Amino acid sequence: MSELKYQAIDYTLLATENLKPGDILIHNEELVRRIDQIAEDVAERYKGQRLMLVGLLIGADATLVRLREALFKIGFDNVETEYMQVRTRGEDLESSGAIEIIKDIPPAMLVGKNALLVDDIADSLTTFAGVANHFQPNGLASFATFSLLEKPARHKPELVGVPLDFVGFKIPDIWVEGFGLDSYGYGRGNPNIVFGPTPEALAFRDAQLK
């Protein structure tokens, strides 16, 4: 397995006490540049092989689309795309990495494939552990993970061994939205990663409760 040319950008020590909701944590230009770097590492690891990108709906869509475009631009176009949708099923089950599959990929489509799971954020690692366990008996040639953001402070101790193969940015334990991440169903379309929840997201939430 090839070593990564680019390492995750570490913002975990970023001072956050003066951040206001809506303040930009990571600009779109930096997000795009980092995903382009990860595409280089992904292309190197899977050189000469076919790759299946598995996006976790809905949050990972922006990241996956950008990664796929970046791979194409550097000549790696041997890519197929599938999507899953999952959710955790409560605190006791969550602690063990158990998930509920809302939208699955037929097992026959996974046999012999190199699957790269793409998600927007890795916090507790519950989702990554659950999908890895779900895929285990399906005859994959290989399984790896890519998370645009990682919150190391939120990792569950019993799940710290769950591999994160490609990571864009390590961030503090703060609420963020944008670039696919939402607050109460709002903010996914923001091209930047911002400190949340924004006033607009809170207003959107309150309107839904009326």
Image (cartoon, rainbow, N blue to C red):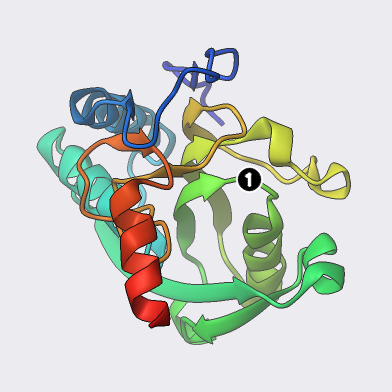
Task: Specify whether residue 76 is in view.
Answer: no
Give the residue displayed 53% in from the left and 14% down from the top: 14
Q: Determine which quarter of the picture holds residue 66.
A: top left
Question: Which of these two is toward me, 146 or 196?
Answer: 196
Is 154 positioned to the left or the right of 57 in the image? Answer: right
Q: Label 1 crowding class (10 Å Cα cut-off): few <14, some 14-19, many 20+?
A: some
Which quadrant would the N terminus be assigned to in this image?
Answer: top right
The relative height of residue 173 versus residue 123 in the rendered view (above or below) is above
Q: Position of residue 50 (x, y in %)?
A: 34, 55
The relative height of residue 37 versus residue 139 in the rendered view (above or below) is above
Q: Position of residue 129 (x, y in %)?
A: 70, 58
Give the residue displayed 58% in from the left and 19% down from the top: 12
The relative height of residue 179 versus residue 81 in the rendered view (above or below) is above
Give the residue displayed 20% in from the left and 41% down from the top: 191
Q: Given the image, on which type of amino acid does mark 1 rest? A: Asp
Location of mark 1 (residue): 123
Q: Residue furthest left?
A: 73
Q: Where is residue 110 in the image (x, y as percent from the top left)?
A: 49, 74
Q: Residue furthest front?
A: 210
Is 145 positioned to the left or the right of 194 in the image? Answer: right
Which quadrant would the C terminus be assigned to in this image?
Answer: bottom left
